[in-house]
Amino acid sequence: MKITLMKNFILGFKNKKYNWDQFLMIIFTFTLPQPAPFQPTYNPDMPKNLLTQGLNWFFVIMSFLCIAVIVWAGVTYATAGGNEDKVQKAKSRLIYALIGITIVISAYAIIQLIKSLAQGNIFPSPTF
């Protein structure tokens, strides 16, 4: 099939039927490697892995958000200039951010504990 197409193309090129861009397009079509067809495979652990990765991303994003609020509270406190209203807002933001980061760390620890219990390796045996 390819040989016949190339032969017809070369004959057409000699007879000035094709131009250079068509020549290059056909040459690259025949010489470039063709990608392998996509064959999806099902992994039975895929939902568990997606859930784990999703939760990990959630904890990372929430941790950065809490740290950003702590920095924001610090900047607000530093630029309050003696204004009691701004100082109070900064203190409340700092307290809420610390509560938030405590909740995030506790939730992560609880999930890791449940994961370890489900796998049965909460108390690994010592190896000598």
Image (spheres, helix red, strand yellow):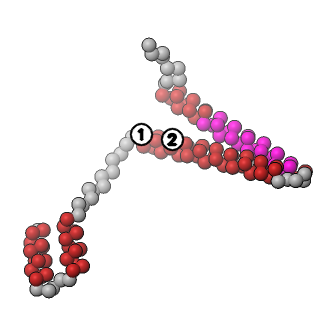
> Magenta span: helix, strand or loop, mainly?
helix
Q: Quadrant of the C terminus?
A: top left
Q: Name which residue type carries label 1.
A: Asp
Quick check: is 101 in the magenta stretch?
yes
Quick check: is 46 in the magenta stretch?
no
> Toward which corner of the image does residue 103 lie, by quadrant?
top right
Q: Identify the residue position indicated by label 2 in the image.
A: 52
> Relative to residue 82, is residue 128 drawn left or right?
left
- Mark drawn on residue 83: none
- Residue at x 69% of width, y 49% of height: 68
Residue 43: where, in percent of width, then height? 37, 42
In the displayed orientation, state which residue is furthest to the top: 128
> Compared with residue 46, is residue 12 higher up or lower down, i.e. above or below?
below
Which structural element holds mark 2? helix
Residue 20: where, in percent of width, then height? 21, 80
- Mark drawn on residue 45: 1
Looking at the rendered image, the disc whose residue lies closer to the viewer, 1 or 2, is 2
Q: Dot 1, crowdedness within 10 Å: few (<14), some or many (≥20)?
A: few
In magenta, the rendered stretch is: 87-108
Q: Quadrant of the N terminus?
A: bottom left
Chain-order first, disc 1 or disc 2? 1
> Relative to residue 118, is residue 44 drawn left or right?
left
- Residue at x 61% of width, y 33% of height: 109
- Residue at x 64% of width, y 37% of height: 105
Residue 92: where, in percent of width, then height? 81, 46
Q: Name which residue type carries label 2.
A: Thr
